[in-house]
Image (tube, grey):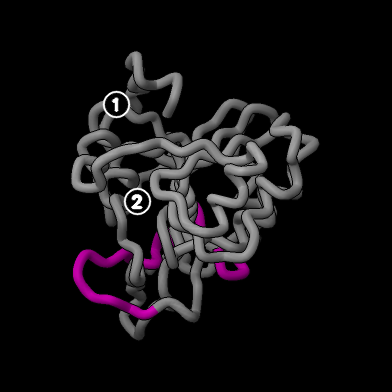
Amino acid sequence: MNNYAGKFVSPETAAKLVCPGDWVDYGFGGGFPELMDRALAARKDEVRDVKIRGGLVIRPRIEVVECDPEMESFSYYSWHIGDYERKLQSRGLCQFMPMILRYLPDLYRRHIRVDVAFVPVSRPDENGYCGLGISNYAWRVIFENARTVIFEINEHLPDCRGWTVPTGCICPRRTISWRASTSRCPCAPIRSRRRWRSRSQSTW
């Protein structure tokens, strides 16, 4: 918990860690990084070819998609299409990636490149720990493989116990960030920064 306050940055600052050509993970279902989505959408004119993965989004809008219908800066890929994403797909703004959910962690471990992960977490408790809420998804293996992880604190997420995230590595206004290239997150050992490529990489 040393220098806890110094770990926090604004969503706008955290969004600058996304580079052109990056793959960004948004998570799944009820755990949606609302602040980081808005902050990244605001960088539309600064980045190109940023690819976002998510699934079963229940928000009324994905800002990076709605702000860029020409898909010059952002492309959105869904693991599991919900009602809103189906409407995006009918407009040509969402690409579906069929998969078997239980295989997803191994796909991330062996084949899928992750540059940046936007991770919604619950409010820190009295010991400085947060939970991954109701959508813990494949976050553990994503943490281990991502170049940069940004945690967005969402006061509305329940603190579901299990594998927890210490807020010593959380990011600003409700967002914290850490870069695997410069520091190590205490909640996940970082492996070598390998960039996995396979024949399937072009669609993922």
User: Residue 183, how many percent across, how many down?
Assistant: 40, 43
* Magenta segment: 158-177
C-alpha separation, residue under disc 2 versus residue under disc 1: 22 Å
From the viewer's perspective, tell me whether residue 99 is left or right of residue 94: left
- Residue 112 within the magenta-colored segment of the rendering: no
Main SS of the magenta segment?
loop
How many discs mark residues in the rendered view?
A: 2
- Quarter of the image with the C terminus is top left
User: Residue 43, how many percent across, how many down?
Assistant: 74, 43
Q: Nearer the viewer, residue 86 or 118?
A: 86
What amino acid is at disc 1?
A: His
From the viewer's perspective, tell me whether residue 192 is left or right of residue 87: left
At a point 49% along the width and 79% down the height, the residue shown is: 155
At a point 44% along the width and 67% down the height, the residue shown is: 30
Q: Which residue is mark 2?
A: 185
Disc number for residue 196: none
Extreme residue in the right direction = 45
Mark 2 and 1 residues: CB-CB less than 8 Å, in contact?
no
At a point 37% along the width and 80% down the height, the residue shown is: 158
Q: Secondary structure at mark 2?
A: loop
What amino acid is at disc 2?
A: Cys
| Residue 17 in view | no
Tell me: residue 94, above or below residue 173: above
Q: Nearer the viewer, residue 174 or 142?
A: 142
User: Residue 115, how many percent across, how many down?
Assistant: 46, 35
User: Residue 42, how many percent across, how many down?
Assistant: 75, 49
Tell me the crowding category of disc 2: few under 14, some 14 to 19, or many 20 or more residues within 10 angstroms, Cα based.
many
